[in-house]
């Protein structure tokens, strides 16, 4: 079961970005930010279980992190729900959801931080990976998503519709990780 779960993320990973596709029967260019965070977390497990080598896992992580850092669109450091796996351009989740998705970004950041801790070698490749992950992590402006400095985070922001979705992140559900990530930020907590 573990190996088959991992194989979904590994085998269906986008060939350019390395990110997880939305689903195996979706448009082949559509990658998902949150799903990629879960896929990233599966890489250390796969290495530990012997499904892939550390070198293979590091190579995929380098592909993912380079794409996120240099190619993917970001909005105050946050990523969209979906993006094009080749160009990094947002694929709208809905009409007004065509920009930052803070909950999906938090799933991605959780995966990146897990990988950062796992790839702890002193060699230049693992050191560079950690540095690049730190750049992405430190770039998320969590506090900006408080919309007018309110005491709550907002899920979505659009370059075309601003805060029109007006969806507060609240509840004891998938959203809790977003507050943990935001509170943990050393740059924009």
Image (tube, helix red, strand yellow):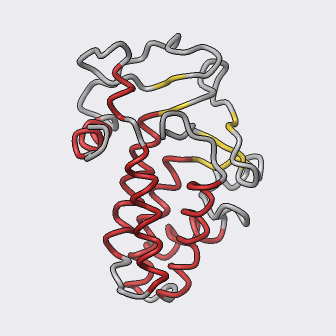
- Residue drawn at the location 72% of the way across and 64% of the way down: 16
Q: Position of residue 176 (x, y in %)?
A: 27, 37
Quarter of the image that includes the C terminus: top left
Residue 87 shown left or right of residue 80 in the figure: right
Q: Is residue 125 left or right of residue 187?
A: right
Q: Residue at x 53, y 10 (%)?
A: 164
Q: Horizontal and vertical percent for residue 101? A: 50, 33
Q: Measuring 47% from the left and 86% from the top, which residue is drawn there?
A: 54
Query: In the figure, residue 148 lies in which quadrant?
Result: top left
Which of the 4 image quarters holds residue 183?
A: top left
Quadrant where the N terminus is found in the figure:
bottom left
* Residue 162 x %, y %: 55, 15
Q: Say whether residue 173 is left or right of residue 155.
A: left
Count of numbered badges drawn on the protein: 0
When asked about the image quadrant of residue 2, the answer is bottom left
Q: Nearer the viewer, residue 81 or 119?
A: 119
Residue found 42% across the figure and 17% down from its top: 167
Looking at the picture, tell me which residue is in the foreground, 7 or 144: 144
């Amino acid at each position: 079961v573990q190996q088959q779960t991992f194989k979904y993320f590994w085998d269906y990973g986008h060939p350019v970005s390395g990110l997880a596709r939305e689903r195996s029967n979706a448009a082949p260019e559509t990658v998902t930010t949150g799903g990629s965070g879960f896929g990233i977390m599966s890489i250390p497990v796969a290495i530990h279980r012997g499904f892939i080598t550390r070198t293979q896992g590091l190579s995929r992580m380098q592909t993912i992190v380079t794409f996120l850092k240099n190619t993917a669109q970001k909005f105050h450091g946050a990523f969209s729900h979906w993006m094009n796996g080749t160009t990094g351009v947002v694929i709208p989740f809905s009409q007004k959801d065509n920009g930052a998705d803070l909950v999906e970004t938090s799933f991605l950041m959780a995966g990146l931080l897990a990988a950062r801790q796992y790839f702890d070698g002193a060699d230049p490749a693992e050191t560079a990976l950690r540095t690049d992950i730190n750049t992405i992590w430190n770039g998320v402006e969590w506090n900006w998503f408080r919309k007018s400095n309110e005491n709550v985070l907002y899920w979505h922001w659009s370059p075309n519709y601003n805060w029109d979705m007006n969806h507060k992140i609240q509840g004891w559900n998938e959203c809790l990780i977003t507050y943990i990530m935001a509170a943990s930020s050393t740059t924009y907590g």
